[in-house]
């Protein structure tokens, strides 16, 4: 079982090769991305709903350096290998691929998913890579978050203890 989980974590080159095969089989590829620092119920709800939009869910995961640039030096709480392993263990996630940049634009351009998903806190026109997906005939969509669940809230609660 551990090897099956590890096999779901790919670099972008290997992922592209896997996706070429899946696309030839007519599979609908869904892509989402994020930090997923402290996994919580809201993440599981979001990822499960994203997976329902297609046949294969690819999760682009910000590396540790990327998160530090975006969220500051105290983040991430968990290192990238731990986060990737935890996410790959989820039944709703088919593959995890890390990206070093601040946004997954180049990764989305390489993958060219059929569906690009982000949380409903984003406007569709502001979703990074949406232009690529729509240009290739794909769909850009958002998913509502569960109220009350966020990594920031968990960190605040821990600090208050």
Image: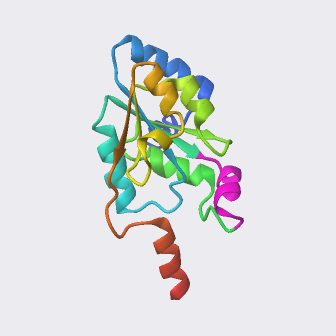
Please name the residue shown 62% across and 61% down the image. 76
Near-viewer residue (109 or 88): 109
The reply to whether the magenta stretch includes residue 61 is no
Position in image of residue 112 (x %, y %): 49, 23
In the rendered image, the vertical position of residue 90 relative to residue 147, given as above or below: above
In the rendered image, the vertical position of residue 12 relative to residue 121, given as above or below: above
Please name the residue shown 49% across and 21% down the image. 18
Q: Quadrant of the N terminus?
A: top left
Near-viewer residue (23 or 123): 123
Near-viewer residue (83 or 157): 157
Position in image of residue 9 (x %, y %): 53, 37
Q: What stretch is highlighted in magenta?
A: 62-73
In the rendered image, the vertical position of residue 46 relative to residue 41, given as above or below: above
The reply to whether the magenta stretch includes residue 64 is yes
Q: In this view, does 156 lie to the left or right of 69?
A: left
Please name the residue shown 44% across and 50% down the image. 122
Position in image of residue 157 (x %, y %): 48, 81
Q: In which quarter of the image is residue 104?
A: top right
């Amino acid at each position: 079982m551990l090897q099956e989980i590890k096999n779901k974590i790919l670099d972008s080159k290997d992922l592209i090769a896997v996706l070429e095969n899946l696309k030839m089989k007519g599979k609908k590829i869904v892509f989402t991305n994020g930090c997923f620092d402290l996994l919580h119920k809201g993440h599981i709800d979001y990822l499960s709903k994203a997976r329902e939009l297609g046949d294969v869910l690819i999760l682009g995961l910000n590396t540790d350096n990327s998160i530090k640039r975006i969220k500051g030096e105290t983040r991430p709480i968990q290192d990238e290998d731990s986060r990737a392993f935890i996410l790959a263990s989820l039944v709703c996630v088919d593959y995890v691929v890390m990206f070093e940049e601040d946004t997954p634009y180049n990764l989305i351009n390489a993958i060219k998913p059929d569906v690009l998903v982000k949380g409903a806190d984003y406007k569709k026109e502001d979703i990074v890579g949406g232009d690529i997906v729509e240009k290739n005939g794909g769909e850009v969509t958002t998913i509502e978050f569960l109220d009350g669940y966020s990594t920031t809230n968990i960190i605040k609660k821990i600090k208050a203890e």
